[in-house]
Every structure is written in C-alpha cells, then in structure tokens.
Amino acid sequence: MEPEAKWNGSSDQVEFSRMSPRSQGFTKLPGQKTCGKSVLLFTFVLLISAALWGTLLFLFITRYQEIVQDLGKLRESCVYHNDSGILTVIGQLQETQLNLKTNVPQLSKTLNKLQEDQTTLKSKASQFSQQLNRFEEDGTAFRSQVLNEKNTATQAREKLQEEIQKLWIEFQRANGSICTKCPENWQVFQKKCYFFGKEPKTWAQAKYACINLQGRLVSIKSREEQVFLNRNANKKGSWIGLRDLDIEGIFLWMDGSSLNYTNWGRGEPNNQGQGEDCVAMRGTSGLWNDANCRGQQDSWICEKLATC
Ligand code: MMA
Ligand code: CA
C-alpha cells in the first residue's frame, strides 16, 4: 500500500511522499487498521522476547542450582577428607606424645646410667694411664739395670781372661820356658806380641778388631814398651787400651791394671768438647791424648802374650 497524501507548497512535502510507510507512522496520523497490526506485532515481539527471557531465566536458575549442589557436595567431601586426615594426624601425634611420655623416665634412666658409665670409664682410663706410666718407668729401670749387669759381666770376663793369661805366664816361668812366639804379622817385644792396625776405626771398633784377633787393645806399662811402640806405630794416631768411661778422670787399662806409667801430652787429658773418654797415642812422639771415642783414629794397637 503506497502513501498517497500530498502536501501543498514545499518540495519537502513532495519528498516525504516517497518515504517508507514505517517512517510515515510518526508524521502521518495512521488509520485504524494499521494501528491494530502494529499492536499485534509489538505484542508478538513482546511475547517472543518474554519467552526468550523466561527460557534464559529458567536455564540460569537450573544451572545455578546445579552449581550450588556441586559446591555443597564438594564442601562435604572436602570437610570429610580434611577432617579424617587431620583426625588421623592428631591421633598419631597423641600416640607419639603418649609414647614419648612413657619413654621419658626410661630415657632419663638410660642417661643417668650412661653418665655413670662415663665417670667409671674416665677413672679407669686414668688408672690405666698411671699403670702405663709405672710400666714405662719399670721398663726404663729394667733396661738400665740389664745394661749395667751386661757391663759388669763384660768387665768380669775381661778380668778373668787377664788372670788366666797371668797364670799362664807364671806357669811358663815356673817351667823355665822363654816365651817369644807370635802369630804372623804380629811383632814380639818382651814376652808380648803386638799388632798395628792399618785402617781408621773408632775406639769401640778397634777394641772388637783386637778381640777378633784373640788379643786386646794395648796396655803400656813401661818407658821401654812405649819406645818400642813409638818406633812401630808410624801413623798419626793409634787407639790404645786406656779409657775413663765409668768415672770421669779415672783412667783404667783394658787388662784391669791401674795407671802407674803415663805418657800424656802437654795439657792432656783435657776432656775437650762433648767429652773425651778414650786414649790415643800420637804418631812419632807417642804422647797420649784423651779423644772422643766416636771419632776415628787412623790406627790401633793390639797386644797378646807371646807363646812358648
Ligand atoms: C784437639 C783434640 C783434643 C786435644 C787438643 C789438643 C782441638 O782438640 O785432639 O783431644 O786435647 O786437640 O790441642
Ligand atoms: Ca784431649
């Protein structure tokens, strides 16, 4: 249905006649039929929209209830789980507490016992330490005693050998024999044989070298014997059988005899440096000097009795 109304005068009114029927509703007074249709349309639209809104509301309420139910379930399950977990933990803790409470007196007893044991062990340790000290002291005393006894025994043996040799001489003299026999490389002088060592040695090494040759370090008893030795000992220094090992300043011969004849150099014996307890005879002059036993002399003189 085309709008037919025409307004007199202006072109605007002519243009208006070409406009859509909807736009014309506000400007042109509608007829009875057109108004009824619009109300119907409006009602229809309203109903549709109400139905849509109702559906939406229904959906929303349904979903809301579901969510509320789910939340309730979730809360229930959470509370159930949490409570039971916490209760279990609390139960365990209470049990542990109870156990600890029961164990405390036992632990305290054990601690006391341990402290007592520690005290006992400490006193035992100190006793052991004292005993150990005593053993060590005893050991040292025993060792020095053994050494002393060994020295005494060595001296006694040397004295005995000397006595035997003297008796042997007496026996030969009583038989009227002249004893001048010496082993090879030994030199005879007045019933004694002498060996002049060639290698440097300490006093102790020289002493054992003589013992190995069935002799001993020489004991010089007279001016004649000294002169004989001077002639034969052509080295710078030779160990002789004189030493003051036991008592400082008291010199004794290896054969046990005392010191009657001496031939000390000027100012000797002087026990110089760290101590000089062994005697050496200087070459050519033959003068005696106390020297360090651990030092070396380039020669040494052994003696033994000549055989018949
Ligand atoms: C050396 C040594 C001593 C000795 C003096 C003499 C320096 O020491 O052989 O035993 O008494 O010489 O001067
Ligand atoms: Ca000296």
Image (spheres, rainbow, N blue to C red):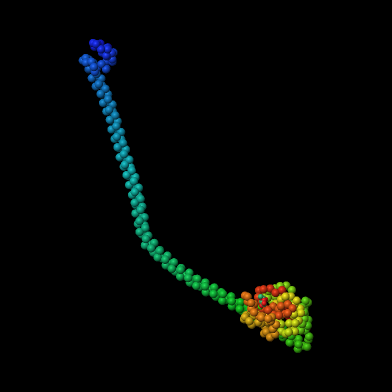
Q: Nearer the viewer, residue 58 or 295?
A: 295
Q: Nearer the viewer, residue 19 or 160?
A: 19
Q: Position of residue 282 (x, y in %)?
A: 71, 78
**Location of residue 181 with respect to 2 vertically, above or below:** below
Which of the 4 image quarters holds residue 109? Answer: bottom left
Which of the 4 image quarters holds residue 193? Answer: bottom right
Q: Nearer the viewer, residue 108 or 265?
A: 265
Q: Position of residue 196 (x, y in %)?
A: 74, 76
Q: Nearer the viewer, residue 294 or 137?
A: 294
Can residue 215 be seen?
no
Can residue 11 be seen?
yes
Quadrant of the image containing the C terminus: bottom right
Quadrant of the image containing the N terminus: top left
Q: Residue at x 52, y 74 (%)?
A: 134
**Where in the image, quadrant-wise, is ligand 1 located?**
bottom right
Q: Residue at x 78, y 85 (%)?
A: 178
Q: Residue at x 78, y 86 (%)?
A: 177
Q: Residue furthest left?
A: 32
Which of the 4 image quarters holds residue 264? Answer: bottom right
Number of numbered discs: 0
In the image, is 127 to the left or to the right of 31? Answer: right
Q: Position of residue 166 (x, y in %)?
A: 71, 85
Q: Position of residue 189 (x, y in %)?
A: 77, 82
In the image, is 77 to the left or to the right of 246? Answer: left
**Location of residue 146 with respect to 90 vertically, above or below:** below
